[in-house]
């Protein structure tokens, strides 16, 4: 079930909300938690009920292992933790990387093993990392343990289930036990609806508009001009920004309706003045997980400069592979790791840079690296990058040339009108890109607007217009990009 669908907005979410607070008021909170878990599993299985046993089995396994780690013998816990992590990684690896591994074996050894053609279970990357963190914290005895119902709610709570944020149990579970959070809070409802519909607008109005131009440039096999190459890359850069930002907003908004505050996961990353700052702002909970559960255990920055650089590159390579089973993803991670290492060396020598130049370099690096993130193959990435550096020439997009030729050879008629209509599309794309790039680098983000929300008449009118436009755009339903990861 999509956040940006009529079923979710007008049926699922209202029913879950009403019944949840009725149960909190009329009975023990256990029933309200059972309701939330049941609805969350229904939300998950809406996509493919065949994968419901997978997430349920993962819940049961990790709860048992976590309980044993909390209550078991300290000496055997390290072996048990290793076993638990390996099972989680194997499960993720089987579904996400089996075909990637087979394809590379076939290429390397000239074999012809059949691919498994496995469909990636929804959210497996997210709930796997979330549960690995739980096991590690259990091993460290950082909490007293939860019952199975609470643990299930922590993992499956539907606003964050599909694409994050990667929530830590300590920051979410206590919120379900707070007495005040079991009552309807009109302030949280207002804030939740405010940020939810901003996120919906970002997704269905802005991101999906950029998707048309990004898809055309990346997926249609024709030679791009210099301008089309940059339009393609920038369109995807903006599509991904508003798509992921929109999802994060909608997740935070939906959770707020239930008085649950999810952690901030997206904080204007395109305002960053260096690559390290970018990763403090983009997918913040993934960065937090990788830092706490991988970078620090590897030694962090405590074992000398060279080891620090190796650890940084390792983390970013893992991040790239986590996002997708492909060498383009790995190379994308490598580029960001290398850029982070260069930035650390730059800072170590005390160099500084004009902030406008720093922003320009950072943004363009991120934009170029996204080409590898988006491309379906090395050939697709090469095709776009070749155009961007001008190797295909600097001519205007072909549609402009065609229109101008028509205008100079025939009178204005229906045929010319058709070509003029074609002229509008690339012009509109360039204008969209310029306008929304200015928006993301110079205006307050939705989280800042939510914190300053006063419920004034002006804000209410603005939200009503935004919501109406977004609702009318729901006919163009599309998945969020991070559902693929």
Image: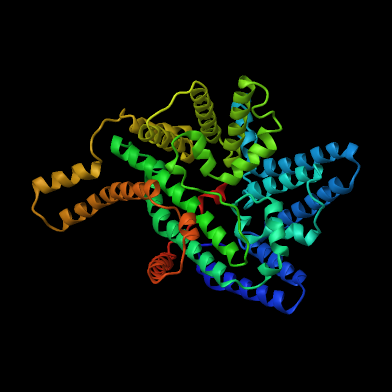
Lateral position of residue 390 relative to residue 47, left or right: left
The image shows a total of numbered marks equal to 0
Residue 290 place in picture, x, y as percent: 64, 38
Quadrant of the rendered image containing residue 201 = bottom left
Residue 127 place in picture, x, y as percent: 67, 50
Above or below: residue 408 compared with residue 205: above
Q: Residue at x 85, y 47 (%)?
A: 70
Q: Nearer the viewer, residue 176 or 9?
A: 176
Q: Nearer the viewer, residue 465 or 477?
A: 465
Q: Residue at x 61, y 40 (%)?
A: 322
Q: Quadrant of the N terminus?
A: bottom right
| Residue ranking furthest to the bottom | 26
Residue 445 place in picture, x, y as percent: 44, 53
Lateral position of residue 431 relative to residue 247, left or right: left
Work out whether residue 477 can be spotted.
no
Lateral position of residue 208 relative to residue 131, left or right: left
Quadrant of the rendered image containing residue 469 = bottom left
Lateral position of residue 70 relative to residue 258, left or right: right
Q: Residue at x 76, y 60 (%)?
A: 150
Q: Residue at x 90, y 45 (%)?
A: 72
């Amino acid at each position: 079930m999509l956040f940006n669908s009529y079923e979710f907005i007008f049926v699922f979410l209202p029913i879950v909300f009403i019944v949840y607070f009725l149960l909190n008021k009329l009975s023990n909170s256990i029933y309200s938690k059972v309701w939330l878990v049941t609805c969350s599993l229904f939300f998950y299985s809406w996509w493919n009920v065949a994968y419901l046993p997978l997430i349920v089995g993962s819940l049961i396994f990790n709860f048992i292992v976590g309980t044993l780690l909390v209550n078991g013998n300290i000496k055997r816990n390290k072996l048990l933790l290793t076993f638990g992590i390996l099972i989680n990684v194997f499960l993720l690896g089987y579904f996400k990387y089996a075909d990637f591994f087979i394809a590379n074996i076939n290429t390397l050894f000239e074999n012809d093993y059949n691919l498994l053609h496995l469909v990636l279970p929804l959210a497996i990357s997210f709930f796997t990392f979330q549960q690995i963190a739980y096991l590690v914290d259990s091993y460290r005895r950082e909490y007293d343990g939860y019952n199975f119902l609470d643990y299930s709610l922590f993992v499956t709570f539907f606003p964050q289930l599909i694409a994050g944020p990667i929530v830590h149990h300590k920051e979410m579970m206590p919120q379900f036990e707070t007495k005040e959070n079991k009552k309807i809070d009109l302030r949280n409802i207002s804030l939740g609806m405010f940020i939810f519909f901003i996120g919906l607008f970002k997704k269905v109005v802005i991101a999906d508009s950029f998707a048309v131009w990004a898809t055309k440039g990346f997926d249609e096999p024709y030679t791009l001009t210099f301008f089309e190459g940059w339009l393609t890359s920038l369109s995807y850069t903006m599509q991904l920004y508003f798509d992921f930002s929109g999802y994060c907003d909608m997740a935070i908004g939906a959770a707020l309706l239930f008085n649950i505050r999810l952690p901030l996961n997206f904080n204007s990353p395109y305002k960053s003045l260096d690559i390290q700052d970018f990763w403090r702002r983009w997918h913040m909970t993934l960065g937090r997980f990788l830092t706490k559960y991988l970078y620090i255990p590897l030694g962090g920055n405590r074992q000398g400069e060279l080891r620090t650089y190796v650890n940084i590159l390792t983390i970013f390579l893992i991040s790239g592979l986590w996002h997708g089973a492909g060498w383009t993803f790995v190379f994308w991670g490598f580029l960001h790791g290398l850029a982070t290492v260069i930035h650390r060396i730059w800072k170590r020598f005390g160099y500084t840079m004009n902030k406008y130049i720093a922003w320009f370099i950072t943004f363009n690096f991120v934009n170029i690296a996204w080409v590898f993130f988006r491309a379906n193959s090395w050939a697709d990435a090469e095709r776009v990058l070749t155009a961007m550096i001008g190797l295909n020439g600097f001519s205007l997009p072909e549609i402009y040339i065609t229109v101008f030729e028509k205008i100079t050879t025939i009178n204005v008629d229906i045929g010319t009108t058709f070509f003029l209509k074609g002229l509008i599309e690339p012009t509109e794309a360039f204008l969209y890109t310029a306008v929304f790039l200015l928006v993301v680098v110079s205006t307050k983000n939705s989280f800042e607007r939510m914190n300053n929300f006063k419920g004034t008449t002006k804000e209410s009118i603005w939200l009503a217009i935004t919501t109406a436009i977004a609702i009318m755009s729901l006919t163009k339903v599309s998945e969020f990009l991070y559902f693929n990861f």
